Image (cartoon, grey):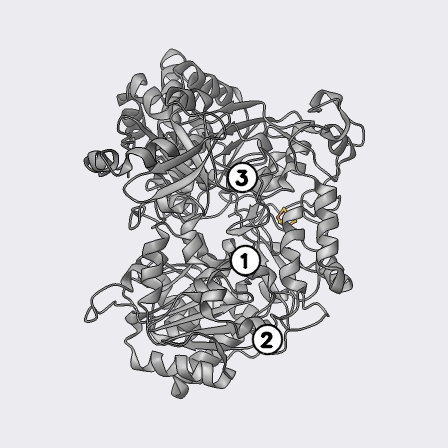
């Protein structure tokens, strides 16, 4: 933790710099790029029935889009206004009125015909609903009866047989804290959150490498660092205002390096709408792009370190910051031994990056005095995600790029609530202020006044799988309480997920809108509870950004959904019903009371109790975690961790396949076309040379298949690394294996190997020989 405080936003230079322009043609006319003005007008039109309220949300609230973080229209990095089309797109979720009665009375089969995008547009869930087994329609139920029914079921179950899950969209720290506490109060550690499927490896890896699982630096550190690396992150698409910070960084001479299997156009050139010269002529973002194999990052990082160790043999101190390492890091010799044992051929084959290119980046970093490493799902969503991130931490530790200005490790988050969810304890491995280890557990027990169960709770994927365990198994899942989330569209293998959802006695969907998972059957009942948005909650709420800014978002005056309730209040109400004799132990009446308790239970959050007004914010941990290289580990040192090169098995004729995001906010799709490359949701991105080799032309109908599933799409030729293909998420999720989790953090594997064929070939030969002949081959998995 650091003493130095964040110094607040800075100004952008006024004079333009034509050297950074992406095009001399104004507004990038003729280029494939987002149309910010057109998109903004569309949002204005969508919100026309509630424009004053929409405006108040934008100017007073904390963004409920991604976790870049902004309060009203201003952030802590740059002085100008901060808004993007992602925020504008999710705005409608907050301003739309209730779903019409007619729709609520529809037959379940008709509701099931709608996509999540169509369901989202229906409006807000107006009041509690229930659909019992065998019923074809939802019917209205009172809050009292709904919570009474859930509580009665919980009383009858062993707490190991129920679980809680919370999504990250818009949910506040107060809600995460309360549900984490309520779960333990009820006797279960089966509580998990959406970060399990995005950044859980980041937290786990950073904890083991440097003792703290959060971004060590600020966005301001991007601006003026020597090298800014985006590793497996398309921040321009997923955290759009980050492009403004990239612009500011370029103006200070920062080199931006992109590492990704696909040469992402969004990270190449960007027309930043709020910067006049960039809006007109665009900005060149990437200085260099390294197209790594899907899953080849560990080999790439080994290559960088291997060259550093080779440089060191020639000249001591030419690559490694020995002062930093000797004072602040353990494990140098073990790491050297591990890394140098790999030969270059292995590293080149696994990474897909040529040796001279690995050396190039190694030397650039060796010559740099500062660097910031930013990463996202491209590194985390692997069965070796934690090792991926520990390797990034190794790079930073070896060069001393930690705990000082313009240096650091940043897992950039895509959901406004996701940073806080784990920190508040809505996680099976975590309690407020630390892990489940005895010391922290006893400390939190004192704050809470009751015992916390000691058994290990299950992660979300395992909880889901527990639904299909034999009845007599002690962890057979009988009740799943979900706050948001759409497992059918986020978890691998949707058919299996459906089977799990349907094999639960009672499923509770506490949400603001319907999604496709809401309509899966349950053995006894599906109960739907209407939640308030963060802007509707009396007493407001807080959310924590990627850079650890804890922002206060006030209650904002506007229309209300009559029966929607504050989420933390619902959990407290439920808990009191399950254990009425102990209700005094879980008695929150205001958001202020929760914040006051968070400050005690999670010491890093000291200061949260003072957040009361619009614009209030503080940063936990100071400007730089591990300031001066001192890590919050038992010996104060970071750990250089050796990791194995993963075995990437790609049988002959297969491609590595991964998923990517298009015009969407997490699983919410806002456009059928990706504005950066014009790809349709069912386009499969592949390299033209690969296509030609197997007789596929651009636009051909193709089938991608493996032992997990079959995806029907069209070939789209783009600059993706040869031998690798990308399908959209969630459309391509059927290609991803179920039940494969990363060892340390439990994130599901989101990659596989698959065969690509022209649809006509696949269908012509399928029945006679093809598929059967390949059954054996299909059993081979890279995972
Ligand atoms: S970049 Fe993220 S935090 Fe900023 S306005 Fe857009 S969605 Fe909100």
Name which of mark 2 and mark 3 comes first in the sequence.
2
Query: Within 10 Å of the Cα at label 1, are there few (<14), some (14-19), or many (20+) other Cα atoms?
Result: many
Q: Secondary structure at mark 2?
A: helix
Q: Which mark is residue 169?
A: 1
Q: Check the image and report above or below for 357 versus 154.
A: above
Looking at the rendered structure, the number of numbered marks drawn on it comes to 3
Q: Nearer the viewer, residue 1 or 200?
A: 200
User: How far apart are the two marked residues, 1 and 3, measured between alpha carbons?
Assistant: 25 Å
User: How far apart are the two marked residues, 2 and 3, measured between alpha carbons?
Assistant: 34 Å
Q: What residue is shown with label 2?
A: 101
Q: Which mark is residue 680?
A: 3
What residue is shown at x 36% (from left), y 76% (from top)? Answer: 134
Q: Nearer the viewer, residue 212 or 235?
A: 235
> Residue 353: percent from the left, percent from the top?
40, 21
Q: Quadrant of the C terminus?
A: top left
Q: Check the image and report above or below for 537 versus 604.
A: below
Name which of mark 1 and mark 3 comes first in the sequence.
1
């Amino acid at each position: 933790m650091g003493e130095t405080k964040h110094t607040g936003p800075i100004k952008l230079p006024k004079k333009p710099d034509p050297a950074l322009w992406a095009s001399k043609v104004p507004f990038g006319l003729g280029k494939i790029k987002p149309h910010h003005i057109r998109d903004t007008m569309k949002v204005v039109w969508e919100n026309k029935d509630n424009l004053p309220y929409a405006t108040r949300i934008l100017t007073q609230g904390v963004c409920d889009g991604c976790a870049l973080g902004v309060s009203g229209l201003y952030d802590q990095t740059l002085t100008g206004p901060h808004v993007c089309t992602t925020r504008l797109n999710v705005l409608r979720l907050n301003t739309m009125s209730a779903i019409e009665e007619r729709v609520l009375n529809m037959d379940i089969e008709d509701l099931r015909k709608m996509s999540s995008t169509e369901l989202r547009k229906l409006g807000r869930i107006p009041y509690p609903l229930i659909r019992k087994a065998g019923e074809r329609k939802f019917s209205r139920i009172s809050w009292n009866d709904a919570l009474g029914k859930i509580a009665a079921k919980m009383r009858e179950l062993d707490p190991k047989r129920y679980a809680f899950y919370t999504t990250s969209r818009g949910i506040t720290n107060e809600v995460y804290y309360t549900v984490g506490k309520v779960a333990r109060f009820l006797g279960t550690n089966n509580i998990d959150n959406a970060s399990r499927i995005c950044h859980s490896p980041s937290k786990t890896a950073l904890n083991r490498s440097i003792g703290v699982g959060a971004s060590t630096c600020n966005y301001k550190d991007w601006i003026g660092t020597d090298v800014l690396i985006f590793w497996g992150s398309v921040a321009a698409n997923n955290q759009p205002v980050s492009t403004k910070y990239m612009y500011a960084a370029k103006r200070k001479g920062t080199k931006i390096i992109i590492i990704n299997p696909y040469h992402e156009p969004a990270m190449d050139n960007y027309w930043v709408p709020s910067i006049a010269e960039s809006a007109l002529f665009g900005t060149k973002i990437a200085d260099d792009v390294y197209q790594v194999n899907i899953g080849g990052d560990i080999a790439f990082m080994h290559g960088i370190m291997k060259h550093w160790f080779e440089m060191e043999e020639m000249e001591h101190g030419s690559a490694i910051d020995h002062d930093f390492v000797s004072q602040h890091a353990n494990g140098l010799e073990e790491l050297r031994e591990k890394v140098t044992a790999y030969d270059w051929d292995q590293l080149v084959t696994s990474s897909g990056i040529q040796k001279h290119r690995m050396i190039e980046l190694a030397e650039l970093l060796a010559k740099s005095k500062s660097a910031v490493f930013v990463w996202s799902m491209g590194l985390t969503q692997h069965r070796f995600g934690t090792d991926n991130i520990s390797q990034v931490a190794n790079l930073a530790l070896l060069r001393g790029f930690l705990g000082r200005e313009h240096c650091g490790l940043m897992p950039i988050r895509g959901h406004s609530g996701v940073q806080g969810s784990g920190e508040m304890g809505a996680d099976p491995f975590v309690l407020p202020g630390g892990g489940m280890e005895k010391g922290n557990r006893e400390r939190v027990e004192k704050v809470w006044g009751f015992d916390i169960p000691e058994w290990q709770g299950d992660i979300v994927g395992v909880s889901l799988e527990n639904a299909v365990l034999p009845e007599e198994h002690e962890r057979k899942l009988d009740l799943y309480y979900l706050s948001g989330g759409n497992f059918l569209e986020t978890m691998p293998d949707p058919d299996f997920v459906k089977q799990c959802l349907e094999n639960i006695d009672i499923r509770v969907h506490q949400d603001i809108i319907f999604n496709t998972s809401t309509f899966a059957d349950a053995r006894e009942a599906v109960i739907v509870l209407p939640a308030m948005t963060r802007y509707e909650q009396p007493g407001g709420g807080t959310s924590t950004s990627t850079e650890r800014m804890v922002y206060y978002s006030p209650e904002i005056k506007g229309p209300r959904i009559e029966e929607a309730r504050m989420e933390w209040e619902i959990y407290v109400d439920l808990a009191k019903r399950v254990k009425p004799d102990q209700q005094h132990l879980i008695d929150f009446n205001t958001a202020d009371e929760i914040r006051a308790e968070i400050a005690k239970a999670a010491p890093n959050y000291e200061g949260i109790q003072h957040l009361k007004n619009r614009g209030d914010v503080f940063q936990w941990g100071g400007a730089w975690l591990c300031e001066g290289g001192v890590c919050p580990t038992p010996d104060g040192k970071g750990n250089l961790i050796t990791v194995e090169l993963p075995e990437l098995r790609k049988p002959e004729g297969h491609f590595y396949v991964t998923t990517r995001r298009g015009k969407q906010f997490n699983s919410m799709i806002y456009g059928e076309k990706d504005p950066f490359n014009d790809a349709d949701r069912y386009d499969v991105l592949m390299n033209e040379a690969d296509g030609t080799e197997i007789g596929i032309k651009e636009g051909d109908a193709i089938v991608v298949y493996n032992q997990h599933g079959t995806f029907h799409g069209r070939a789209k030729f783009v600059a993706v690394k040869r031998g690798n293909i990308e399908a959209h998420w969630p459309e391509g999720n059927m290609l991803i294996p179920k039940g494969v989790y990363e060892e340390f953090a439990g994130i599901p594997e989101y990659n596989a190997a698959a065969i690509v064929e022209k649809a006509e070939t696949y269908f012509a030969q399928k029945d006679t020989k093809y598929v059967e002949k390949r059954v054996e081959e299909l059993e081979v998995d890279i995972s």
